[in-house]
Image: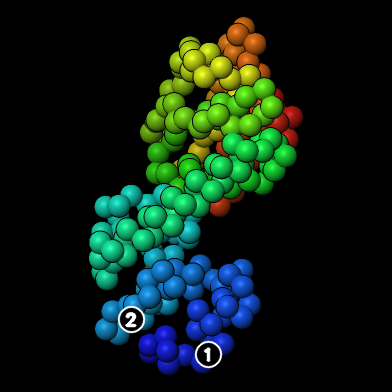
Amino acid sequence: MLLKDLPQDARPREKLLARGPGALSDAELLALLLRTGLPGKNALQMGQELVTTFGGMAGLLNAPAQALEKIKGLGPAKRAEIMAVLELARRALASQLQEKTVFGNPQAIREYLQLQLGGRGHEVFAVLFLDTQHRLIVLEEMFRGTLTQTSVYPREVVVRALALNAAHVVLAHNHPSGKAQASRADEAITQTLKAALALVDVRVLDHFIVTATSSMSMAEMGLI
C-alpha cells in the first residue's frame, strides 16, 4: 500500500500538520524523510525497518554510513538526508549547552550524551569541558576501549583541561551492555580523575553513564 492510499489521518505528513511532530512514531518521522519506498514496501514500512534493524532511534543515530549502505532502498541521497538530520540534532543540543548553564537543563545534557555515545558498540570515555559559568566549551572523546574496558589516562585529561582553560568538567562514558550502572572501576577512575584535576583547580561536577536508551548520573547517586 502506498502512503497516499492510507486514510488521510494516518498519513505521516497530514498527521504531523494536524497534530504536531510529537504525535508521530519514529517510523512515521523517518517515512517523511524517505518520502518513497520500494516495490511492495512503502516509506512507512521502510522507516519501521530502519527502527527495527538498528534497535531504535538511538542505534540509528550512531549507525556508521557503512551500515546504512546495507539497507536496500537507501540510496546516496536518502542516506545523506538521514545523516544530515541526525547531525543537526546533535548540533542543536550542543548549541543549547554552549549557550546556557549545563545544569540549568539536565535533561539536555543526558540527551546530548546519549546521542553522542549511547549507541556505540565499544566503550568511549568522553569529557565535557566547561567554563566558569558551567557552559560547554567542547566535548572531547578522549579514550576508546573494548566492550568491557577502557583505559583512561588522567594526565591527558588534565593537559586538555589546562589547554582549554576549563574550570569544570563532566565525565561521561557509555556501556554497550545496555546497563547504565556504575561499576567499582567506574567509581575508582572517577575518584582518580577528581583528585588529579583538583591539583590544577578543575572540579569534576558529574560522571554520566549512558546507554542507547538510558543514563545515570553518579552525582545524583552520591558517588561524586
Closer to the eye: label 1 or 2: 1
- Please name the residue that numbered disc 2 is placed on: 41
Residue 54 place in picture, x, y as percent = 40, 59
Q: Residue at the front extreme?
A: 99
Q: Is residue 131 above or below residue 106?
A: above
Q: Determine which quarter of the picture holds residue 168.
A: top right
Mark 2 falls on what kind of element? loop
* Front residue of this view, candidates 218 and 184: 218
Give the amino acid type for the residue marked by disc 1 in the picture: Gln
Q: Determine which quarter of the picture holds residue 52.
A: bottom left
Residue 42 place in picture, x, y as percent = 36, 81
Please report the residue visible at 70 percent of the width from the left and 31 percent of the height from the top: 219
Residue 116 in sight: yes
Residue 50 place in picture, x, y as percent = 39, 65
Q: CA distance from mark 1 to mark 2?
A: 19 Å
Q: Which callout, 1 or 2, points at the residue further toward the start of the chain? A: 1
Residue 100 place in picture, x, y as percent = 67, 38
Q: Are marks 1 and 2 in contact (CB under 8 Å)?
A: no
Please report the residue visible at 72 percent of the width from the left and 39 percent of the height from the top: 104
Mark 1 Cα within 10 Å, few/some/many (few <14, many 20+)? few
Please report the residue visible at 70 percent of the width from the left and 43 percent of the height from the top: 105
Q: Report the quarter where the C terminus lies.
A: top right
Q: Report the quarter where the N terminus lies.
A: bottom left
* Front residue of this view, candidates 159 and 63: 159
| Image coloring type | rainbow
- Please name the residue that numbered disc 1 is placed on: 8
Give the amino acid type for the residue marked by disc 2 in the picture: Lys
Q: Residue at the top extreme?
A: 199
Q: Is residue 156 above or below residue 174?
A: above
What numbered label is drawn on residue 35?
none
Please report the residue visible at 28 percent of the width from the left and 64 percent of the height from the top: 77
Mark 2 Cα within 10 Å, few/some/many (few <14, many 20+)? some
